Amino acid sequence: MARFHVTTAAVSRLRELSDSYAEPAVVVLYWTGPQADNRRHPDGSTEWVRVSEGEWNVALDSRARYEGTPLPLEVIDDLEFIVKAFPQQNPGSIVGRILDYVNGAFHVR
């Protein structure tokens, strides 16, 4: 049983992308941690501003790249997924989440 769910819309779009990929592909879910940017004030002081709280991202990558790695491969609706999670950066987990494709973009909720 998979740790996460994938909607019909996401499966459909991932199949389209996978079919156009040059070689056998896997879907990679990966976490990008919180991001901050700094702003300089006229007096020279610096202010740090949070621009992202962190998010799950979706990409396709060559299946050959992951052969022999300890990352577990999960198969959902004939698509192969690899989850790259970094627990020290990710307060949440992929467990129980849903990968969806809405308005031209992937979303993990």
Image (cartoon, helix red, strand yellow):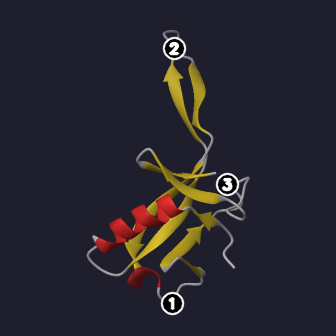
Displayed quadrant of residue 12: bottom left
**Where residue 16 appears, x then y in whole percent?**
34, 66
Determine the residue located farthest toward the bottom in the rendered image: 68
Disc 2 from disc 3: Cα separation: 29 Å
- Asked whether 58 or 7 is in front, the reply is 7
Q: Amino acid at mark 1?
A: Gly
Please rate how many residues cluster around mark 3, counting C-alpha atoms within 10 Å: few if below 14, some from 14 to 19, many from 20.
few
- Residue depicted at 71% across the width and 60% down the height: 93
- Residue depicted at 69% across the width and 79% down the height: 1
- Residue depicted at 58% across the width and 68% down the height: 84
Q: Residue 42 has which mark?
A: none
Q: Amino acid at mark 3?
A: Gln
Q: Is residue 108 left or right of residue 3?
A: left
Please rate how many residues cluster around mark 1, counting C-alpha atoms within 10 Å: few if below 14, some from 14 to 19, many from 20.
few
- Residue depicted at 40% across the width and 61% down the height: 13
**Where residue 7 appears, x then y in whole percent?**
56, 61
Q: Residue 68 has which mark?
A: 1
Disc 1 from disc 2: Cα separation: 50 Å
Precedes in sequence: disc 3 or disc 1: 1
- Asked whether 90 or 2 is in front, the reply is 2
Q: Residue 41 has which mark?
A: 2
Disc 3 from disc 1: Cα separation: 25 Å
- Asked whether 52 or 46 is in front, the reply is 52
Task: From this view, report whether residue 67 is shown above or below residue 8.
Answer: below
